[in-house]
Image (spheres, rainbow, N blue to C red):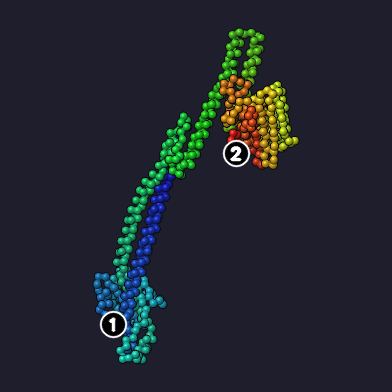
């Protein structure tokens, strides 16, 4: 199982270790290079000091005049130093007493005036050597500035090579001590960094543990709980906001489920009680004339219950199992006329007037059977709830991108707060549910089928005593609902 805490700890500790290694390596290499430059500079300075003791005499011969102050470092002391001077022909002019009969060698064959390199010393230790090429000066013993012929010849002679060597044990010991100190310091820094990272990561993730602990205690009966956003770090505030949104949706869903269960129980309890009463009466007073009437009543009740159950199953399938609509070209105007004709008789009984404002023809791509069911439920709802002598207006407009159908009918008693409940199953304005001819499932079925076809629904109260439901069909992308921004007092469902 992946752990953010473990990953943060590993990566941060690993980063600290790598940075410590990089910093320690840089310090070591930089110090080593600086000490080596300083060591070589000292050797070169000694070589130049020794070169000043080599000169040509007036007869043109090379000579080495040692000075006691300069030769004290090249005796057989504990920390011995060595030098050796060669003539151009390779013969040794002078060597330090510390060399005895050993030879340093002429070293690198370089045209540079100075060169430094590592060298094994005669006693087996590792040392450092510096080679210096120079032209000796002439010793003028004659009076005045007159130079002898031999002196002039000596000035034209080739350069002399001088090599100075010294043990590097002191420098290597210093570098070794530095390396040990860097390793110990790096180890201590890594250990301290690991402890610090563990503490910081634990404290930094404490709000996450708090959210997890609070979420663990949320049950179905405590969906009203909300996470405190202001007390959370900025990084967790969006998560807490989304969790609060989810809890609110869950609470609303559970509330709808409870209301739905209660509504179903209420809707089915009444017809079941009526059926039971009819059966008990028929059994207690079995009369042929009364039996026929009882059977007719029982059939009507059974049909009412069948309608409720069938509608509930249709809504459940549309909301849970994805329906695959059969998209075909449909003449929306012709379909509206056909569905209006099926409600003419019912409208005439209540003296309801139909006013149609429809173009000659509008083609849309949709599922014909689902569209007929939607239009049937919308028109049935309008005819049922429009009072006698009322009016139903149907208006249809379209363009290249969308088509909007609006059905407006006379309505009594609806208010703006009621709009948010219209698409809930079994919701009715009459709290007592005394009207058994309506189950409150028509608009719920419309919303379920509209979601399948991608139709945007909008309900509003355009004028006092009027109710309007609008259906927006997309032509550019059939099957996908467009998002609508509704003004205040309107409800949109996509």
- Secondary structure of the residue carrying tag 2 is loop
Picture quarter with the C terminus: top right
CA neighbours of label 1 inside 10 A, class few (<14), some (14 to 19), many (20+): few
Left or right of 487 on screen, residue 237: left
Cα gap from disc 2 to disc 1, whole angstroms: 106 Å
Q: x%, y% of residue 135?
A: 36, 82
- Quick check: can you spot residue 103? no
Question: Dot 2 corresponds to which residue?
Answer: 485
Kindly state the secondary structure of the residue where label 1 is placed.
Answer: loop
- At x 60%, y 34%, the residue is 490
Position of residue 390 relative to residue 365, above or below, is: above
Residue 248 in percent (x, y) is at 50, 34
- Report x, y in % for residue 392: 68, 28
Question: Hey, which quadrant is residue 268 in on the image?
Answer: top right
Q: Quadrant of residue 100?
A: bottom left
Residue 65 numbered tag: 1
Work out whether residue 270 can be spotted.
yes
Name which residue lies at 72% across and 25% down. Answer: 344
Outermost residue to the right:
360
Q: Residue at x 67, y 39 (%)?
A: 402
| Among the two numbered marks 2 and 1 on one chain, the one whose residue lies closer to the N terminus | 1
């Amino acid at each position: 199982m992946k752990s953010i805490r473990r990953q943060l700890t590993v990566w941060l500790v690993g980063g600290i270790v790598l940075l410590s290694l990089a910093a320690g390596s840089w310090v070591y290499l930089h110090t080593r290079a600086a000490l080596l430059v300083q060591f070589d500079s000292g050797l070169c300075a000694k070589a130049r000091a020794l070169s000043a003791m080599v000169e040509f005499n007036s007869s043109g011969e090379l000579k080495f005049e040692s000075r006691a102050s300069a030769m004290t470092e090249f005796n057989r002391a504990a920390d011995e130093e060595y030098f050796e001077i060669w003539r151009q022909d390779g013969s040794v002019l002078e060597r330090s007493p510390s060399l005895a009969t050993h030879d340093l060698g002429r070293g690198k064959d370089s045209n540079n005036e100075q060169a430094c390199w590592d060298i094994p010393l005669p006693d087996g230790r590792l040392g450092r050597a510096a080679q210096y090429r120079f032209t000796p000066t002439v010793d003028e013993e004659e009076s005045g500035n007159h130079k002898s012929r031999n002196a002039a010849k000596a000035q034209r002679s080739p350069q002399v090579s001088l090599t100075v060597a010294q043990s590097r044990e002191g420098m290597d010991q210093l570098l070794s001590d530095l390396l040990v100190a860097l390793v110990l310091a790096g180890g201590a820094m890594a250990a301290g960094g690991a402890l610090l990272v563990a503490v910081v990561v634990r404290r930094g993730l404490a709000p996450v543990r708090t959210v997890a602990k609070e979420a663990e205690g949320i049950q179905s009966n405590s969906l009203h709980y909300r996470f405190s956003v202001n007390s959370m770090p900025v990084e967790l505030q969006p998560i807490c906001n989304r969790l609060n949104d989810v809890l609110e949706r869950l609470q609303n869903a559970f509330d709808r489920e409870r209301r739905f269960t209660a509504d179903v129980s209420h809707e089915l309890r009444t017809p079941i009680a009526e059926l039971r009463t009819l059966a008990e009466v028929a059994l207690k007073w079995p009369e042929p004339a009364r039996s026929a009437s009882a059977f007719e009543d029982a059939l009507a009740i059974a049909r009412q219950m069948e309608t409720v159950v069938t509608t509930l199953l249709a809504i459940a399938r549309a909301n849970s199992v994805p329906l695959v609509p059969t998209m075909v070209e449909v003449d929306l105007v012709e379909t509206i006329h056909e569905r209006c004709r099926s409600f003419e008789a019912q409208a005439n009984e209540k003296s309801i007037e139909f006013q149609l404002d429809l173009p000659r023809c509008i083609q849309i791509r949709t599922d014909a059977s689902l569209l007929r069911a939607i239009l049937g439920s919308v028109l049935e709802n309008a005819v049922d709830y429009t009072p006698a002598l009322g009016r139903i207006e149907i208006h249809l407009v379209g363009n290249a991108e969308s088509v909007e159908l609006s059905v407006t009918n006379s309505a009594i008693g609806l208010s703006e707060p009621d709009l948010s409940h219209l698409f809930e199953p079994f919701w009715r304005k009459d709290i007592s549910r005394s009207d058994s001819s309506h189950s409150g499932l028509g608009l719920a079925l419309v919303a379920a089928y509209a979601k399948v076809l991608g139709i945007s629904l909008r309900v509003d109260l355009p004028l006092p005593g009027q109710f309007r439901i609008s259906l927006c069909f997309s032509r550019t992308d059939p099957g996908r609902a467009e998002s609508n921004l509704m003004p205040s007092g309107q409800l949109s469902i996509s």
